[in-house]
Amino acid sequence: MGGRPSVLRVVLAIITIAALATATWLGVVGRRQSNRASSLRQANAAAVARNRALSAKLSGLTVANSRAQGRIARIEDDRGATAGGMDSVVGAWNDWLTANNALIETANGFVDHAAEPSGAEMHAALDPRLRTITAKEAAFRAAIVKFAAAAAKARHDASSAKP
Amino acid sequence: MTAEMAHEYSVESPAGPRVKWLGVAVVGALVLAIAAGIYRHQETDHARRAAARAAVLDRETRDLEMKVAAARTKLEASRAELRAKAPGTAALLKVLDQLNANHASMSSIVRDQDTSTAQIIDALSRKQYDTYNALVDRFTNSTRTVDALATTETKLRDELTRSGCGDTCSATEAAAVNPRR
């Protein structure tokens, strides 16, 4: 009976030492992992902040680019609008001119006529032409107003389109 | 073994309490080892998750950096395009001024001619042929102004087209320099 307790003591002591050594090793490894996780978390927080700043910068650049493209498109649109307005002016001008010439030709026809026409007859022939001229004049003035508005818009857009 | 015998044994053998304490130490050491194992496992898991998140964030950063570089290039291109349009825009504004002046003259001539036509009809219906002839002469003279204004308008239209194409439309410019016959 004298040797049994001492063998048990040795075995128990070995187990205790082994368990303590394992616990120490696991603790050290765990601590290292904890430190690594901590530094990674810090780096991740910095990366998140950096990504947020990059996103804000990207957003700003995109907005600025959209604004620049919008200005370019507006300049082109304005040019198209003024050119279109000018065509309308020229068209209205030519219509007015045609109506004027028609009236003068009709009037000259009366002058060249051998028989002297009555005033009523002349009015009946010329008044519609005069009304046409008045209508054409109104169309011409409307085209002028439209062109002036397009020109004013083009001027405004051009002055605000500094790069 | 009865209780008395056990009591007698424990009193007699000093190894008994040591074995008991060693048993407690073994159990304690094992519990400590298990706890350390759990701790290690958890921290390894945290570190692994943090590393995975770091990889994702790194990809995001690189992606964002590329997008920012591309957006900056685009913006610079847009600004360059805008700057390139500046001379054309200045030319356009100049042409617009000239056109507005021309249109004011056109409006004036329209007003004058319309007054003349009304007077012409009136003179004709009253058989005042001298007045009629004088008015028609004036009308004819004004027609020359009308023609001049129309010519200016055409010239300005060409300039307007030219201001839109900048350096890229030499054909248009050549057409403007050598007017059609």
Image (cartoon, rainbow, N blue to C red):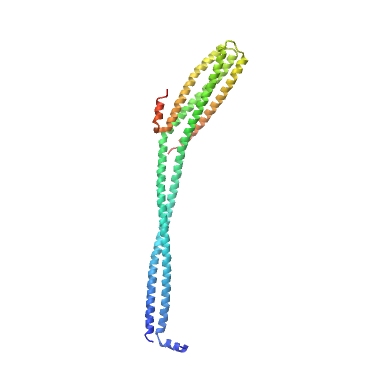
x then y, percent, for residue B52: 42, 58
Place of residue B148 in the rendered image (x, y in percent of width and height, measured from the top left): 47, 21
- Above or below: residue B12 compared with residue B108: below
Question: A62 and B2: which one is in front?
Answer: B2
- Taking the spot 42% from the left edge, 66% from the top edge, the residue there is B41
Residue A31 appears in view: yes
Number of marks in picture: 0
Q: Residue at x 49, y 34 (%)?
A: A153
Give the residue at x 61% y 15%.
A121
| Residue ranking furthest to the top | A114
Rendered view: A13 above or below A48: below
Q: Quadrant of the N terminus of chain B?
A: bottom left
* Quarter assignment of residue A134: top right
| Residue B138, x across and y down, in percent | 52, 16
Residue at 45%, 46% in the rendered image: A60
* x then y, percent, for residue A33: 39, 64
In which image quadrant can residue B122 be found? Answer: top right
